[in-house]
Image: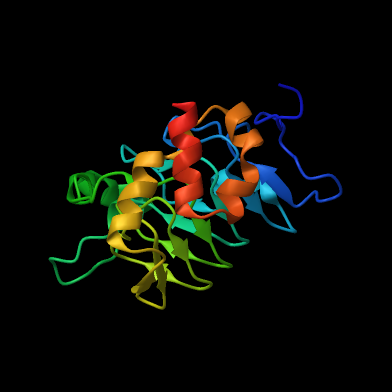
Amino acid sequence: MSGVPDPDVVRPVVGAERVVLLKPLVRSALIEVGEYTYYDDPDDPEGFETRNVLYHYGPEKLRIGKYCALGTGTTFVMNGANHRMDGPSTYPFPIMGGDWAAHFGLITGLPGRGDTVVGNDVWFGLDAKVMPGVRIGHGAIVATGAVVVDDVPDYGIVGGNPAKVIRRRFSDEDVERLLAIAWWDWPAEVVTQHVPAIMAGSIDELESVWKSVR
C-alpha cells in the first residue's frame, strides 16, 4: 500500500529538522531501537547516541521499542556510570592512568542491573532521565523531568525524582487486552489503515480491528 511512512528516513517531518527517527541513525551494537521511534531536539538530534546515552561501555544494552516519542533531553544513564561504594572513597583512581592503572581490577566487574528496556508506544517528556537496568512497560508515559530509578508498569504514568507511579492509564483488564492486541506489531500497512482507531478509538474498537486482521 502507498502512503506508509518510510521508517528509514532520518527526518520524517517536513519542515521539522529537529525530529529524527532513531533506528536509521543508531550505529552502536549496544543500542536497539524499533521502527518509527523518534527523538525531538532543536540543537543536535542526530547526536542522540553519544549525547543522550551516557557511560555506555557495555555489555548491558539499551533496547527501545517501536513508536516511542522521546522529548528533548531524554537521557539514558547506563551501568558504566557506577562507582564502587563499599570502600572509603568512590573515586575511580585506575582510569586516570599512571601507577593507578595497576589497580584496574578494583573497578571492573561492578554489579549491574542488566539491560535497560523500553517497551513500545512509550512517551518521554522533556529532560526525562532513565537510570541503569530500568524496564519501562508498553504504553507508559514518563513525565517531564522525571528520574526513573525503578521499573514502570505497562500503561503507567510516572513523574518526579525519584519517579513514582501517578496512575495507570487503563484498568488492569484493559491493559491485558491492549497487550494482547499489541497494535505496534501489526504490519505498517495495517497500522496505516487504522490510525484513527489506534489514536482515538475505544479499546473495543481496536480489539475489533485486531480480530479482523490477525
Q: In this view, does 180 lie to the left or right of 206?
A: left
Residue 115, image quadrant: top left
Image spot of residue 24 (x, y percent):
62, 31
Camera-side residue: 180 or 147?
Answer: 180
What residue appears at the point 57 percent right and 43 percent down from the top-left corner? 37
Residue 71, image quadrant: bottom right
Location of residue 170 with respect to 166 vertically, above or below: above
Image spot of residue 80 (x, y percent):
34, 50
- Mark yes or no: residue 65 visible: no
Location of residue 95 with respect to 188 vertically, above or below: below
Location of residue 155 with respect to 30 vertically, above or below: below
What residue appears at the point 51 percent right and 37 percent down from the top-left corner? 209
Location of residue 12 with respect to 81 vertically, above or below: above
Residue sitting farthest toward the left: 86
What residue appears at the point 75 percent right and 40 percent down from the top-left corner? 11
Residue sitting farthest toward the right: 15
